[in-house]
Amino acid sequence: MATAPFPAFSPSQRILLGPGPSGVSAKVLNALASPTVGHLDPEFLRLMDETQQMLRLVFRTANALTIPVSGTGSAGMEACVVNLIEPGDRMLVCVNGVFGGRMADVAARAGAEVRKLERPFGEVFSPDEIAAAVSDFRPKVTGIVHAETSTGALQPIPEISRIVHQAGSLLLMDCVTSLGGVPVEIDEWEVDAAYSGTQKCLSCPPGLSPVTFSERSIKAMDARKTKIASWYLDMSMVKNYWSQQSRAYHHTAPINMNYALHAALRDVLDEGLTARHQRHWNNHLALRAGVEALGLQYAVAESHRLPVLNAISIPAGVDDKAVRGMLLKEFGIEIGAGLGPMAGKTWRVGLMGESSSPRNVLLFLAALEGCLAAQGGNVPAGAGTSAANRTYRELNTAV
Ligand code: PLP
């Protein structure tokens, strides 16, 4: 009998402290391994309805068109852009990192007349500069990244939303890294379209992109004169599959990925959004105390630091790749490299979803101390873990 010429793939158990994917619980992995049913099976239809309801709770919205797009966060980005933009429409894209840059690229490919409003990596936009740009350019859509995973900066949204709407523009927000980790308020902030990803603070494997569209953006889609450029991501067709009234096959849903998202969303709601945000914040504070006690510094100003993605400056004389390599090889810990102008200058330490825990913070600090010492650095022994433990005691968090 023939045998497959390849051994079975059995990946190592990693501690995922990079920019995503984050750790996935056994409960979510078990959901993924449940028996596959048909995409129109009544049991699956029930799961779809519940998933939409849970997504609305997590996005904090009443938007009817709230679904997981089949595909990763970039598919959600494309879905929002191609549905809102017709060739020749103006789109202002705020670019202060890699993902703002990607949104501008996607918009240009969709035929938009794109204007980029740029800030250096690691900085955020002020309401005044957005006001000047929208009143000059008069875009149909303004796109902005809430949590820039490439830099570790968190963009305040409410004031910007008001300004964008006053100029008659729609607000498109990337919340790939923020959803489930820091507050995201779609209705209160009047965000018109938003997309996220499953593999960050929702702690599900990558593969789906939750999106939500406001009534205002649906009106804009209904008023289109041209067909949506993407067949796969055409929400006017996809929404029929997700609607109880007009259920119709569009494409075969990634069934088991939807099981996993359903399980992950249940976990988010079981914990409660406020408690979950607090957990992410507390672990960030402990990490920060530890990192600073080891003599390292953050690359992003405290006023707009993203708690779920910690951009840490690499000290002079320390070999970026050697440290990341040692963390992975000796401790099974993955962290991220810097991107763009921050490449070689920062490490990106993600504390997202399941990965955001005192256990991981303390393990990472102890491992980092070892890696820095192996590089010949003069690191105070135990300083990182002591500082983090002190912070946990102060926060009254059980370790
Ligand atoms: N936007 C942001 C802020 C991201 O961090 C990412 C991925 O890291 C994306 C978009 C793209 O998502 P994906 O890699 O899942 O396609």
Image: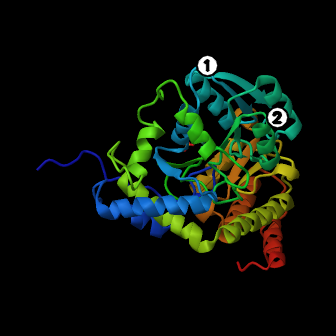
Residue 22, given in percent of the width and then of the height, sits at 58, 57
Disc 2 is placed on an element classified as helix
Mark 1, secondary structure of its residue: loop
Quarter of the picture containing the C terminus is: bottom right
Q: Amino acid at mark 1?
A: Gly
Q: Is mark 2 within 8 Å of ligand 1?
A: no
| Towards the viewer: 50 or 341 | 50
Residue 117 in sight in this render: yes
Residue at 71% across / 59% down in the picture? 183
Quadrant position of residue 379: bottom right
In the image, 345 versus 170, the foreground residue is 170
Disc 1: residue Cβ within 8 A of ligand 1's nearest atom: no
Q: 10 Å neighbourhood of mark 2: few (<14), some, or many (≥20)?
A: many
Inspect the image, locate mark 2, and give the three-letter code of the amino acid beneath it: Ile
Q: Above or below — where is 180 with respect to 238?
A: below
Q: How many other residues sit within 10 Å of disc 1, few (<14), some (14-19) or many (≥20)?
A: few
103, above or below 271, in the image: above
Q: Which residue is mark 1?
A: 88
In the picture of the structure, the residue carrying the numbered disc 2 is: 130
Relative placement, left or right, of 73 versus 10 is right
Which of 268/66 is in front? 66
Q: Nearer the viewer, residue 353 or 258?
A: 258
Residue 97 got which mark? none
Q: Which quarter is ligand 1 in? A: top right
Q: Position of residue 342 (x, y in %)?
A: 75, 37
Q: Is residue 13 visible?
A: no
The label nearer to you, 2 versus 1, is 1
